Image: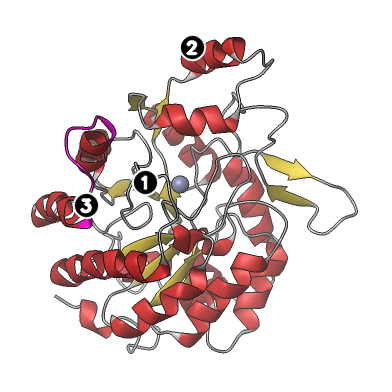
Amino acid sequence: MKIGRFVVDTHVHAQRHAAGDRLRQRAATDNQNDARYTDLSHEMRHLIAYDNSPRLKFDMETYGVDMCVLLPSFGMTNEINLEIVRNDPDKFVAVCNAKKTVDKALAGEEPWSIEAACAELDGYLSTGNFIGIGEGCPGNPTRKTTIGQTERMDEIRVAMQLARKHKVPMQFHTGVVMGYPLTHCYWPETLNPMWLIDIATEFPDVPMVLNHGGMQGWHSKKWVEDCLFLAAASDNVYLETGLWWTELYERALVDPNIGPEKLMWGTDWGASLPIHGQLRHEPQTYAVQYRRQGVVSHQVDMWGWSLKQLWRLDIPQDDLNLILGGTAARVYKLPVPHTRLFKPVNPKLVPQMEK
Ligand SMILES: [Zn+2]
């Protein structure tokens, strides 16, 4: 049985890096037995990604997932995602990021700026082929020093103006996963989600989707707490929840200012992100990268794990359906097969998104 009537994963990477050779070379040079996540994070930006949608479609069939929101990430191109969407428009939609601006900065051709990134995004969004901006809000990939809060917030404001112009949601990355180095140079808001309360208040008409809802990995709830606050204290903040374990859903569902209408399932399918088990400890399973074991080589079964967390929730099916697709359909204006599939929610949530 399918877990819901229209199931959407809002955080999917349908492209994969052929990183093996370069990682093995690096490991050999450094006298390491295994390729490390820090190496992968450096190599990803330079690698060519390939279309991994056949494996994705196999999992969609296996787990009854109807639609995926495709996110480009390091090294993944908007063009490949668009091709995947064009081949199956009833199964896929895509958000865009400013990859060419990143590539030029990494190649030393043109220094990165938020203005250049937004000019590139403006071009993609003007085609009408993309439904939002992500993964995360554009940041400077060449920066090696800490960026201050004021400076980063001003970059984010420029990007939010663009989201407002095109009436699309803006994604922000929150949470960390242990293997990939994540510092205050690139996406400081991922370690300080609380900063975003100012942005949410300044741009009440622009939906903000927090990638991972503070839980990209690890067992601590510290960033989830901040994200719960943002969702509870703002009408325009939504949380991706696909890497949450059951108890985290319960926390959000009993909060009278959050509830299923602020949650959308989104797992990070396609990321090199194993699920760790620790029987008789809380949580018994959670996503995390193993720094000492090196990069996982198989396609981790994220949906099997994540959907199990949701099956445990004994809540009304119409509420579950909001988490599994209804909230995403509303916020991203997804093409759904029928009207009235989802229970209506307070129209104050994203009222301005009507075009
Ligand atoms: Zn991701």
Q: Which residue is mark 2?
A: 21
Frontmost residue, 354 versus 97: 97
Pick whichever of labels 1 and 2 is earlier in the sequence. 2
Q: Is residue 320 left or right of residue 17?
A: right
Q: Which residue is mark 1?
A: 143
- The residue indicated by pointer 3 is 113
> Is disc 2's CB within 8 Å of ligand 1?
no
**Disc 3 Cβ-to-ligand 1 distance below 8 Å:** no
Q: Position of residue 348 (x, y in %)?
A: 33, 89
Q: Which residues are magenta?
A: 106-114
**In this picture, is 59 found above or below 260?**
above
Q: Is residue 76 visible?
A: yes
Query: Marks 3 and 1, Cα distance to the nearest angstrom?
Result: 11 Å
Left or right: 188 with respect to 159?
A: right
Nearest-to-viewer mark from 1 and 2: 1
Q: What residue sits 35% from the left and 46% below the top?
A: 70
Amino acid type, label 3: Ser
Residue 246 horizontal/vertical position (percent):
70, 63
Is residue 295 magenta-colored? no
- Disc 1 is placed on an element classified as loop
Q: Find the residue positioned furthest to the right.
A: 280
Q: Position of residue 10 (x, y in %)?
A: 42, 55
Which callout, 2 or 3, points at the residue further toward the start of the chain?
2
Secondary structure of the residue carrying numbered label 3: loop
